Amino acid sequence: MQSLRSIYSAIILALALVLGSVHTLEARASSWEQVQYKGGTYITLQSVSKHYKLTMTRNGKMLLMENAHYLIRGEVGSRSAYLNNVHFNLAFPIVSHAGKYLISRIDLEKLIDPVLRPNFINNAKAFGTVVLDPGHGGKDRGARGHHGFEADYTLRVARMVRDHLRRLGYKVVMTRDSDTYVSLERRVQIANQFRDAVCISIHFNSAKNSSATGIETFCVSPPGVTHYGRSLQARDKKAVPGNYVDSASMALATAVHSRSLQYTGNKEDRGIKHARYNVLSGIRIPTVLIEGGFISNPGESRMVHTNAYQQRLARGIAEAVVIYRHAITKGRR
């Protein structure tokens, strides 16, 4: 198995494999073998592997698809998948059916394709503005950790990210820049004032299980996909404003998640997940929400409390913005 590699470095190296040989998602749908399974549309992984020039092998329940730049692995019956060892949570499990291995068309269109080919995302625009959303604040302290409150950590990290990005020439907008309460609705309104921009909402995690650790990143659920951790509800089937850019949000989430893990050295990759939080559903520019660690865990809380960890996380987020912008514009026609 390969050692952990930076996913977006691999993406940039591998763009040459697909540039000039593929067109829009709709135009090349016929190159995929579609299967109807339990009321849903699936694509055979055999045809996916062929299309992206990957070699597919099976080891027990584990499926591997790889070439010189990518290693994609997933388990039959599971929603967990790994691309260059970065963890993704699929909308639907991988299926074995009639001698074929299947992945949902939603996961192909809204996860695999945007990550492998970010520069082909139709509405992923070049941008010079970044909206930073430090979670909580004021009367809303967020989670209480062993060494402090979430609201204080999110603001500190957001200010560090702001300073990094400004030095790189970006315009940065903060939904809050002091210990004040800003409603979720107001945060959405602030971000929606901008068109050629991206938004990153910064949080820290808490759980009743004090042993929980790690970093996880969320982007908006496509229509028909549940909010993480709950069953499908009627409202999940409806499109929300964030769905206009959900493919771009997935590509941004991949950069933010992988770089945050790399720079912090946090060893627990909890994955990139779908959710319908207000800031993800309501914002019409590519938006992600990162949970930068568990302050309910004694050891991780102590780490999060340090300036060194906060600086590393901020650097990872800032570099992810640069990588994402490069990935969506490289070779664009």
Image (cartoon, rainbow, N blue to C red):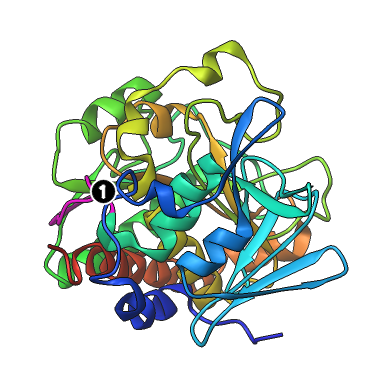
Any magenta on residue 247? Answer: no
- Determine whether 106 is above or below 330 in the image: above
What's the magenta region? 121-131
Find residue 323 and report its horizontal and vertical position in percent: 30, 70
Q: Nearer the viewer, residue 210 or 90?
A: 90
Q: How many numbered circles are shown?
A: 1
The residue positioned 48% from the left and 79% from the top of the image is 6
Q: Is residue 10 left or right of residue 144?
A: left
The residue positioned 48% from the left and 26% from the top of the image is 223
Find residue 279 and report its horizontal and vertical position in percent: 40, 32
The residue positioned 40% from the left and 47% from the top of the image is 29
Residue highlighted by disc 1: 198
- Determine whether 210 is above or below 59 in the image: above
Q: Nearer the viewer, residue 98 or 270?
A: 98
| Residue 171 in view (yes/no) | yes
Q: Nearer the viewer, residue 147 or 50?
A: 50
The residue positioned 19% from the left and 47% from the top of the image is 197
Find residue 248 and report its horizontal and vertical position in percent: 33, 49
| Residue 201 in view (yes/no) | no
Secondary structure beneath label 1: strand
Find residue 170 and report its horizontal and vertical position in percent: 14, 61
